[in-house]
Image (cartoon, grey):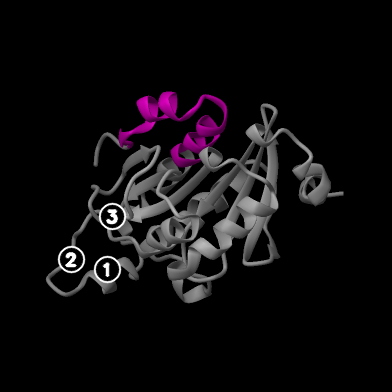
Amino acid sequence: MTLFSKWFQPKQISNEDPMKKFLIVGLGNIGPKYENTRHNIGFKVLDELAKQQETSFTTDKLGDVAVFKFKGRTFILLKPSTYMNLSGKSVKYWMDKEKIAQENILVISDDLNIDFGTFRLKAKGSAGGHNGLKDINEKLGNQNYARFRFGISAMFGKGRQVDYVLGEWDKDEMRYFPELLDKASKLILSFGTAGIGNTMNQYNGKQVEDL
């Protein structure tokens, strides 16, 4: 029996204390052509965390899902399969299905307004022009959920934003990825165990010194 099959039984998960369950959402677009693009950093972070926790994703309704336990908490990892602009539908479905408190939701997204290699964790806030966050705000009816913004910087010319966001990471950026993805995974575990305040204090800011 795999770790996934052991824990991903709807009755087992739903019957647990809702305050010990966390829905971690990585935003991205499905399909191989988007796999290594900047806009898919949410998927990349969850892939790394799932690997570290020795669990795997299974395709389910409105997304790919993986589950693991850590220090008495259950982490449900969700990669929506609705495409970025409709992410809210998937988030709302899994939040309701697993009876997860909204304060236990963390959404991971890219952010053009933050330097590459910089993390910004916030308890709530606006969409900041991000279409995935905008749809989640609309589907939930509020902005009161935690979001983890992964800085991708704004190194593009006028009118090239879409190409940049949907472009692949360059070689200079890629060499920092192992360290950044590891720290992103630790941030998520801290969010679920130490709380958002302590996690913000520890992780907000630049993550790689020589950037």
| For marks 2 and 1 on the same chain, the one whose residue lies earlier in the sequence | 2
Check if residue 186 falls in the magenta segment: yes
Q: Nearer the viewer, residue 191 or 133?
A: 133
Q: Residues within 10 Å of mark 3 (few under 14, many from 20)?
A: few
Residue type (three-letter) at the residue carrying disc 2: Phe
Residue 56 location (% of width, % of height):
69, 53
Residue 115 location (% of width, % of height):
23, 47
Residue 94 location (% of width, % of height):
63, 55
Residue range highlighted in magenta: 183-207
Q: 154 left or right of 37?
A: left
Name the element at disc 1.
helix
Q: Mark 1 and mark 2 in contact (Cβ < 8 Å)?
A: yes
Above or below: residue 50 compared with residue 197:
below
Q: Which residue in the protein does label 3 denote?
A: 128
| For marks 3 and 1 on the same chain, the one whose residue lies earlier in the sequence | 3
Q: Residues within 10 Å of mark 2 (few under 14, many from 20)?
A: few
Residue type (three-letter) at the residue carrying disc 3: Gly
Q: Nearer the viewer, residue 125 or 27?
A: 125
Helix, strand or loop for the magenta stretch, by majority = helix
Q: Which residue in the protein does label 1 denote?
A: 164
Q: Which residue in the protein does label 2 denote?
A: 156
Residue type (three-letter) at the residue carrying disc 1: Tyr
Q: Quadrant of residue 145?
A: top left
Name the element at disc 2.
loop
Name the element at disc 3.
loop
Marks 3/2: CA–CA distance = 18 Å
